[in-house]
Image (tube, rainbow, N blue to C red):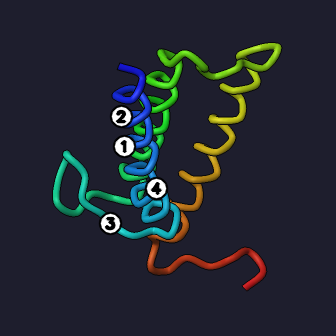
Amino acid sequence: MEFVFYFLAGFFAFNSLPHIISGIIGNKHMTPFGKETSAMVNVLWGFGNVIISLVILSFTQVGIQPPPSSEFVITYLVGGLVISLMDANLFSNPNAKMPWW
């Protein structure tokens, strides 16, 4: 059963990559919600896959060794989600400009 947990955790972790990366660079990409979903939806879907992977890993014998406080993990993930959504919003706008341009 341990191998099944690791397989599924890897499945969801690596499935998150194309969604998060496509979203961050502002591209549309296929999700279960549609063939060409927005960059923002892809970031959210990718982060959902990361969370599923972490939950599955918690069922393994090794498990995820939590830091002294789980608030650190949550804060880390929220920081990554915020910058990913900001980038998705910026780079999916065809008229996007950096503040100094």
> Are the two marked residues, 1 and 3, in contact with CB atoms closer than 8 angstroms?
no
Q: Which residue is the site of mark 4?
A: 17
Q: CA distance from mark 3 to mark 2?
A: 25 Å
Q: In the rendered structure, which amino acid carries the disc numbered 2?
A: Leu
Q: What percent of the width, then of the height, locates residue 13? A: 46, 43
Q: CA distance from mark 1 to mark 3?
A: 21 Å
Q: Residue at x 52, y 62 (%)?
A: 24
Closer to the camera in the image, 54 or 19: 54
View extreme (bottom): residue: 101
Closer to the camera in the image, 73 or 34: 73
- Name the secondary structure under disc 1: helix
User: Which of pointers 4 and 1 indicates the residue nearer the eye?
Assistant: 1
In the rendered image, the quadrant that contains the N terminus is: top left
Q: Residue at x 36, y 43 (%)?
A: 11
User: Which of pointers 4 and 2 indicates the residue nearer the eye?
Assistant: 2
Dot 4 or dot 3: first in sequence order is: 4
Q: Which residue is the site of mark 2?
A: 8
Dot 1 or dot 3: first in sequence order is: 1
Q: Which residue is the site of mark 1?
A: 11
In the rendered image, the quadrant that contains the C terminus is: bottom right
Q: In the rendered structure, which amino acid carries the disc numbered 3?
A: Lys
Q: CA distance from mark 4 to mark 3?
A: 14 Å
Q: Give the side of residue 13 with respect to residue 69, left or right.
A: left
Q: CA distance from mark 4 to mark 1?
A: 11 Å
Q: Which residue is the site of mark 3?
A: 28
Q: In the rendered structure, which amino acid carries the disc numbered 4?
A: Leu
- Name the secondary structure under disc 3: loop
> Does 33 appear above or below 21?
above
